[in-house]
Image: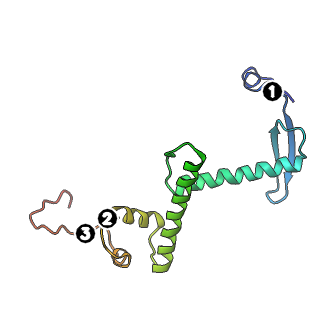
Amino acid sequence: MILESYYSYQGYPEPLRRIRYYDQALDKRLVFLTNDFNLPATTIAALFKYRWQIELFFKWIKQHLRIKSFYGTSQNAVKTQIWIAVSVYLLVAIVKKRLGIELSLYTIRQLLSVSILEKTPLVELFSQSNYTTLQPTCRNQLLLFD
């Protein structure tokens, strides 16, 4: 198969292999394009399935670990940043489970980020039940909102 539209052909003029695959678990027919003419169709389908798992993993990273961009471009720099983010996520999840905190992981991370330099024990930090109605300690402080 060769791509026939003008822009597609300009982008990739080489022949492609079209593979149709029926996924019993999803009860769907899938179609893949590849430039590999040697591997069996089932191997190509498995590779696309693994690729999709990697895509889902990076989607999860973006949603949960809040990595907006990578600070380095080398393989080591990217791996290091991902492992640090995963480690922080797991540590927050462990704290949530061990202390029985009912807040979301996002809220816990926010509280930890604003109190990172304070010497407040975690149990005390998360024992407060209402985080939005803290009264000012100075009586002369003007209130912006009622």
Tell me the kind of residue under disc 3: Leu
* Picture coordinates of residue 58, whole percent (x, y): 61, 52
* Picture coordinates of residue 130, whole percent (x, y): 32, 72
Counting residues from the N terminus, which is met first, the one under dot 2 or under dot 1? 1
Tell me the kind of residue under disc 2: Leu
C-alpha gap between disc 1 and disc 3: 64 Å
Is residue 47 depicted above or below 83 in this figure? Answer: above
Q: Are marks 2 and 1 in contact (CB under 8 Å)?
A: no
Decide: few, some or many residues near mark 3? Use Cα within 10 Å; few <14, some 14-19, many ≥20.
Answer: few
Q: Residue at x 49, y 79 (%)?
A: 98
Tell me the kind of residue under disc 1: Leu
Q: Residue at x 90, y 46 (%)?
A: 40
Which residue corresponds to mark 3? 134
Q: Which residue is farthest left?
A: 140
Which residue corresponds to mark 1? 3
Decide: few, some or many residues near mark 1? Use Cα within 10 Å; few <14, some 14-19, many ≥20.
Answer: some
C-alpha gap between disc 2 and disc 1: 58 Å
Marker count (numbered): 3
Examine the image and state in which quarter residue 74 appears: top right
Which residue corresponds to mark 2? 117
Examine the image and state in which quarter residue 116 appears: bottom left
Counting residues from the N terminus, which is met first, the one under dot 2 or under dot 3? 2
* Picture coordinates of residue 133, whole percent (x, y): 27, 68
- Classify mark 3: helix, strand or loop: loop
